[in-house]
Image (cartoon, rainbow, N blue to C red):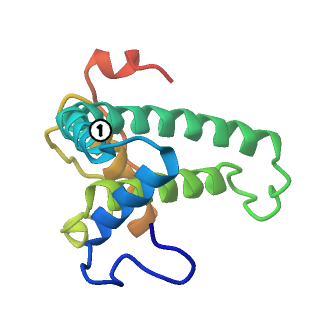
Amino acid sequence: MTGGNESCTAGPTSMSYLTCLTYILEEWTGVEHIGDYLSYAFYILWVLFPLVVVFVLPGVIVILFYISILLLHIYKRKNEIKEAYSHDVWVGGREMLATLWDGHGRIWHGYELHGVENLPPGPGLLVFYHGATPVDFVYFSARLHVMKKRGCSVVADHFVFRLPG
């Protein structure tokens, strides 16, 4: 084993960093052939990775919905900033949630909104497809609120109102 200030690349035969790490783990744990165990663990991780990806995104979205509800509840309780927004108390809450969801859409999905300058200044009708969950509308309304400070009303199917939260 290498000691003191020696490295795995010192000596007559140089090792790759992964081989060096395997050698150090074998010495530290006392388990022989730890590389076989690690390769098996990496194989299991590779096989189960699609399942992890499938369940992580909906889990993050549901957690973000409940965090939004919790933040609005805290905002309602700690409402000392009424003087700054005298016409509507919930302006700060809308800004906070729009920024939260816009950031999630941009970071997680790379969500962008093009053609907002073509929206009429008054009322309008936007028709778009949504997939299995209405999260894309949440991203759209958050981005629209951040860019134009405009709200959007919804006409939706009954199942949308059965979602928890």
In the image, what residue occupies the spot 86% across and 53% down? 80
Q: Is residue 163 above or below residue 93?
A: above
Q: Is residue 118 above or below residue 43?
A: below
Residue 7: give x, y in percent of width and height: 43, 80
Of 127 and 142, nearer the camera is 142
Residue 45: give x, y in percent of width and height: 26, 38
Q: Quadrant of residue 39?
A: top left
Of 70 and 39, nearer the camera is 39
How many labels were placed on the picture? 1
Residue type at the position of mark 1: Tyr
Q: In the shown orientation, is residue 54 left or right of residue 27?
A: left
In the image, what residue occupies the spot 20% across and 48% down? 126
Q: In the shown orientation, is residue 7 left or right of residue 125?
A: right
In the image, what residue occupies the spot 20% across and 67% down? 114
Q: Is residue 117 above or below residue 110?
A: below
Mark 1 nearby-residue class (10 Å; few <14, some 14–19, many ≥20) = few
Tell me, yes or no, if residue 155 can be seen here. Answer: yes
Q: Quadrant of residue 56?
A: top left
Location of mark 1 (residue): 37
Q: In the shown orientation, is residue 26 left or right of residue 5?
A: left
> Quick one: SS at disc 1?
helix
Q: Quadrant of residue 129?
A: top left
Q: Is residue 77 above or below residue 15?
A: above
Of 26 and 42, nearer the camera is 26
